[in-house]
Amino acid sequence: QVQLVQSGGGLVQPGGSLRLSCAASGFDVNYYAVGWFRQAPGKEREGVSCDNIMARITYYADSVKGRFTISRDNAKNEVYLQMNNLRPEDTAVYYCASADSGYGCYEHSSKSSEYGRWGQGTQVTVSS
């Protein structure tokens, strides 16, 4: 079955860290662009970070630059989002997604409409 399954997330205090995982099955995610998005209540979905391995592009939104890191484990067919120095405004449901190579992830943006496979989403809450 072709799918992305997320794990991680939860409740963390401001300044804390979390790591989100996204496990791909049924396809080799290493041939695809991957992205992380988030959506807070009442707000539009926002592209947080993405990695286009074929184009050698990694993108981070200004709001997370220097705090979040996207990475892959090729052997495990997994993608991660390491989130450090978390802030209350990072509270949202986070989604991983994959896009055909050459789409979705660009130098200055990550276009959600170009991603074809999505994880189930996981809640991240930053609160004291």
Image (cartoon, rainbow, N blue to C red):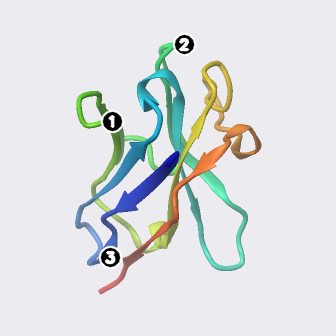
Secondary structure at numbered mark 2: loop
- The tag earlier along the polypeptide, 2 or 3, is 3
Amino acid at the residue labelled 2? Ala
Disc 2 from disc 1: Cα separation: 19 Å
Q: Is the C terminus in the top left, top right, bottom left or bottom right quadrant?
A: bottom left
Secondary structure at numbered mark 1: loop
Determine which residue is flagged by label 3: 10
- For the point 60% across and 21% down, which residue is it? 101
Q: Is residue 74 visible?
A: yes
Q: Give the residue furthest to the top.
A: 55
The correct choice, above or below, for 92 with respect to 108 in the image is below
For the residue pair 116 and 107, the one nearer the viewer reads as 116
- For the point 42% across and 25% down, which residue is it? 30
Determine which residue is flagged by label 2: 55
Mark 1 surroundings within 10 Å by alpha-carbon count, few (fewer than 14), some (14 through 19), many (20 or more) = some
- The tag earlier along the polypeptide, 2 or 1, is 2
- The tag earlier along the polypeptide, 3 or 1, is 3
Image location (x, y in percent) of residue 37: 56, 53
Q: Are marks 2 and 3 in contact (CB under 8 Å)?
A: no
Residue 103: name its quadrant. Answer: top right
Amino acid at the residue labelled 3? Gly
Q: Give the residue furthest to the front.
A: 1
Query: Count of labels shown?
Result: 3
- For the point 48% across and 21% down, which residue is it? 31
Amino acid at the residue labelled 1? Asn
For the residue pair 125 and 24, the one nearer the viewer reads as 24
